[in-house]
Amino acid sequence: MASSPRLSRTGFHARSVSLPSRPHPTVPEYDEILCRLQSSGAASSSSSSIRNSLEGLQDLHDCLGSLMLLPESQQALAKECHGELVDKVLNGSLQLLDICGTAKESLMMTKECTQELQSSLRRKGCDAKEASKYLACRKAVKKSIQKALRNLKDLETSENGQDSFVMVSMLREVEQVTLSVLKSLLSFITGPKDQSLVSKLMHSKSAKLETKTEFEQIDAAMQSVEKHKAAGINSIQADVADLELSIEDLESGVERLYRHLIKVRVTLLNIISY
């Protein structure tokens, strides 16, 4: 998605004569965060980068919320309350809540089966039965995520051109960058679609130089155990512990983002129903 320099160049009043004649001080911050998130989207392939993106989204939604509370913004949004553009924004915000909810549920499910695996490793090690149980949980998580992503088709294919009203355009910009980060998160949770790739990661010497996510490491280890191949218990325990910590960090970020999404949606609903 292209960046949005028009806000930096022309100020908050660029697309609506109803808005302030001078740029609002929050706009440069909004622009900076938006551009940073857009440029870092392709690099969101680690838990730390995704966690940073989630934190950036929270700041972006804070900026958006502040701009929405300006009297000029509220007046203009109220005039558009029955318009098609606002309807699209409301529908988009609902879909974002759904996909964010899927991310929360997926992380919770994975954490639960990870904790069960960790408990088993401490008590008796890990056998093929425990490995199969873990992989069955991961399969259910991936199925849920794939279903949620299919339901995003309408949101992804919506028109992204400039809107005549600045606040609607900002709402849609935030919607798209939020969707991009959430998709990166869900792809990070599911890991590679090709299961043969996981196998290659375990057995190829050259692949050892590749960076594997915490989810991929445990998936690959459990596939190896399920096939009754040797696996170092101490190494698995350490990797499972790392995965659990990563999940907890991501859960915290997703939960805070979920609350921000609700806040923006409630603010918009309050404005247009006033």
Image: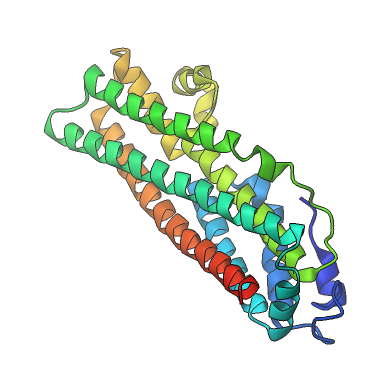
Above or below: residue 157 compared with residue 86? above
- Residue 228: image quadrant is top left
Above or below: residue 233 compared with residue 34? above
Color style of the picture: rainbow
**Residue visible at 75% across and 62% down?**
83
Q: Where is residue 4 drawn, in percent x and y?
A: 80, 62
Q: Where is residue 67 drawn, in percent x and y?
A: 67, 77
Q: Is residue 261 left or right of residue 81?
A: left
Q: Can residue 211 be seen in this view?
A: no
In the image shown, does 152 or 202 lie closer to the viewer?
Answer: 152
Q: In this view, does 121 lie to the left or right of 171?
A: left
Task: Specify the farthest residue to the left.
Answer: 123
How many numbered discs, if any?
0
**Residue visible at 18% across and 32% down?**
120
**Residue visible at 57% across and 37% down?**
149
Above or below: residue 236 compared with residue 20? above
Image quadrant in which the C terminus is located: bottom right
In the image shown, does 245 or 267 lie closer to the viewer?
Answer: 267
In the image shown, does 130 or 70 lie closer to the viewer?
Answer: 70
Q: Is residue 110 left or right of residue 213?
A: left
Q: Where is residue 63 drawn, in percent x and y?
A: 63, 73
Q: Where is residue 81 drawn, in percent x and y?
A: 70, 68
Q: Can residue 183 be seen in this view?
A: yes
In the image shown, does 205 or 161 lie closer to the viewer?
Answer: 161
**Residue visible at 85% across and 68% down?**
6
